[in-house]
């Protein structure tokens, strides 16, 4: 009996030590299998999320459908919800494109707004907005409605992320700013000329009037009877000096008239600069992005 106990004890000990090892090995295989499945699902999910952010709903939906084909994820809630979001996005984009095609602009913009509410990062929809507002800005610019055109260009700039398009729109806005705020140097110069010439003409006229008035006063004092004879040498000297001064002032009458003319011309020029707006060149090379392909379209307007 004593000899039989030892083999039994030995078998029991072997069983106790070997069983945990099998469980660990089995658990390791199960863990490795789960990791492989998770990586496949995550790869499809990441692709789908990236495409969804760009607004490529058809391609994104295919990736989310791939998620559901991964073993163990056939009923994945996230993938199913994203498939529904993509389907909604595709429907809204088609409605927007149809509305644009029928010139129903307000209705089309409403569908685009719904797309951004669905997916605020939708790059394609943002470029569609930029397309619309840049096109609207070009039309208003060609109609010389510069302030309205600037507003449209500003809206387009807020939507687009394409560097070339952003630079083109900025140049358009700068052109409008120059039109709305032309250089003040010509107006300042003409204004100074008008004021200066007018002031000098007034000075010449006042000088002549004062000297002619002084001559009259001396004449009445030195020759109160108007006989033309001044017996007093001192009075005659004063009269002669006043007469010479009045004659010199009168000789400047031509300069006075010239100053008046210059002041008048400068005033007219000033008014012209204030009221006249030079019509800018409306021909320009314009770069427009293709909202569906992320390419660039070149246009030339006259």
Image (cartoon, rainbow, N blue to C red):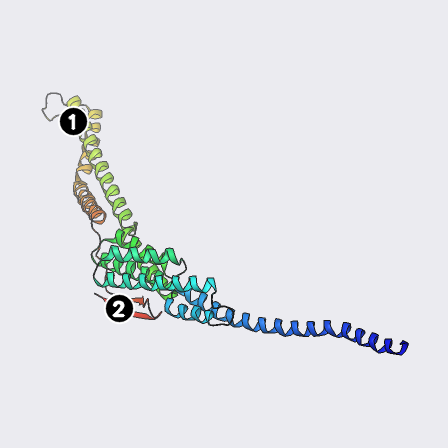
**Can residue 286 be seen here?**
yes
Question: In the drawing, does residue 20 fall left or right of residue 284?
Answer: right
Q: Residue at x 38, y 57 (%)?
A: 118
Q: Residues within 10 Å of mark 1 (few under 14, many from 20)?
A: some
The residue sitting at the left extreme is 227
Find residue 78 and report its horizontal and vertical position in percent.
46, 62
Q: Which mark is residue 299?
A: 2
Find residue 101 and report its horizontal and vertical position in percent.
22, 64
User: Which comes sooner in the sequence, label 2 or label 1?
Assistant: 1
SS assignment at label 1: helix
SS assignment at label 2: strand
Find residue 267 and report its horizontal and vertical position in percent.
20, 44
Could you say which is closer to the camera, residue 174 or residue 206? Answer: 174
The residue sitting at the right extreme is 2
- Circles 2 and 1: CB distance less than 8 Å? no
Q: Which mark is residue 216?
A: 1
Could you say which is closer to the camera, residue 45 or residue 178? Answer: 45
Q: For residue 162, what is the image quadrant?
A: bottom left
Could you say which is closer to the camera, residue 50 or residue 296? Answer: 50
Question: Which quarter of the figure is the N terminus placed in?
Answer: bottom right
């Amino acid at each position: 009996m004593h000899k039989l106990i030892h083999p039994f004890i030995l078998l029991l000990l072997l069983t106790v030590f070997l069983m945990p090892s099998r469980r660990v090995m089995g658990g390791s295989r199960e863990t490795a299998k789960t990791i492989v499945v998770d990586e496949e699902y995550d790869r499809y999910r990441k692709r789908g999320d990236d495409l969804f952010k760009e607004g490529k709903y058809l391609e994104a939906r295919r990736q989310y459908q791939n998620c559901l084909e991964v073993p163990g994820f056939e009923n994945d809630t996230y993938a199913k919800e994203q498939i529904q979001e993509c389907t909604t996005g595709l429907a809204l984009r088609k409605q927007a494109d149809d509305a644009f095609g029928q010139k129903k602009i307000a209705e089309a913009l409403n569908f685009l707004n719904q797309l951004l509410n669905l997916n605020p990062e939708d790059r394609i929809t943002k470029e569609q907005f930029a397309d619309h507002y840049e096109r609207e800005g070009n039309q208003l610019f060609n109609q010389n409605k510069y302030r309205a055109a600037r507003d449209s260009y500003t809206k387009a700039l807020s939507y687009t992320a394409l560097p070339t398009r952003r630079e083109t729109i900025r140049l358009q806005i700068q052109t409008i700013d120059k039109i709305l705020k032309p250089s003040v140097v010509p107006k300042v110069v003409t204004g100074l000329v008008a004021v200066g010439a007018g002031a000098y003409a007034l000075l010449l006229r006042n000088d002549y009037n004062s000297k002619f008035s002084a001559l009259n006063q001396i004449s009445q004092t030195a020759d109160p009877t108007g006989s033309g004879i001044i017996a007093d040498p001192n009075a005659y000297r004063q009269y002669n000096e006043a007469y010479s001064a009045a004659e010199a002032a009168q000789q400047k009458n031509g300069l006075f008239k010239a100053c008046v003319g210059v002041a008048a011309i400068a005033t007219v020029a000033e008014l012209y600069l204030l009221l006249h707006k030079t019509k800018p060149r409306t021909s320009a090379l314009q770069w427009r992005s293709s909202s569906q392909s992320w390419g660039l379209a070149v246009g030339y307007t006259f």
